[in-house]
Amino acid sequence: MLQMIDEGLIELNINGETRKVLVRPADTLLFALRERLGLTGAKPGCENGDCGACTILLDGWPVKSCLMLAVEAVGHQITTIEGLENPPIQQAFVEKFAFQCGYCTPGFIMNCQGLINNHPEADEATINEWLQSNICRCTSYQEITAAIKSVLQKNPA
């Protein structure tokens, strides 16, 4: 059950901290993160759920924050790219040249982290399926796939 602290003021658990944020009922989680809390790692792209640039983890699963209302996130654990503590997938993106301009990279890293957490034995088909939720216009998905595989190989389940 949603409990507002005051008119429009909600509490969100973001990156392990409870944060109070003033939102309108129609504010997306992406808007609240970026404009109200200054967490700009999740990027606005298409803002209709197609590109994945706004991906965050919600209770450990990738979610497109442009499609979720901020009030829907109350009571859930939100992790943004700012809340990751140098996971192996970030280094793998560097080592495998899995980014160019970098705009989509935070969303891809969050999606890949969700994949690694939830499917530590992911096969090629699972990796390909998960990568369909994000779009990169600069690099090929071969490098991103290589980054994921390198992390999965180093950390067998």
Image (cartoon, helix red, strand yellow):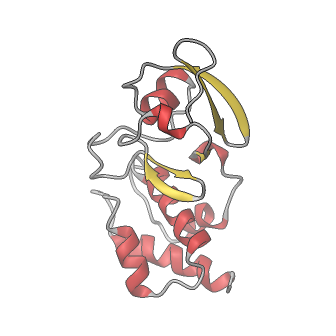
Note whether 14 is above or below 116 in the view shown: above
Residue at x 45%, y 52% (from the top left corner): 63
Q: Residue furthest front?
A: 1
Q: In which quarter of the image is the C terminus?
A: bottom right
Q: Quadrant of the N terminus?
A: top right
Residue at x 55%, y 51% (from the top left corner): 58
Counting from the top left corner in percent of width and height, residue 72 is at 48, 38
Q: Quadrant of residue 37?
A: top right
How many badges with numbers are in the image?
0
Counting from the top left corner in percent of width and height, residue 43 is at 41, 40
Q: Is residue 155 toward the left or the right of residue 129 in the image?
A: right
Counting from the top left corner in percent of width and height, residue 2 is at 55, 32
Counting from the top left corner in percent of width and height, residue 73 is at 53, 39
Residue at x 52%, y 70% (from the top left corner): 115
Note whether 135 is above or below 154 in the view shown: above
Q: Residue furthest top?
A: 7
Residue at x 44%, y 70% (from the top left corner): 144
Q: Which of 44 and 32 is in front in this view?
A: 32
Q: Is residue 130 toward the left or the right of residue 7 in the image?
A: left
Q: In which quarter of the image is residue 59?
A: bottom right
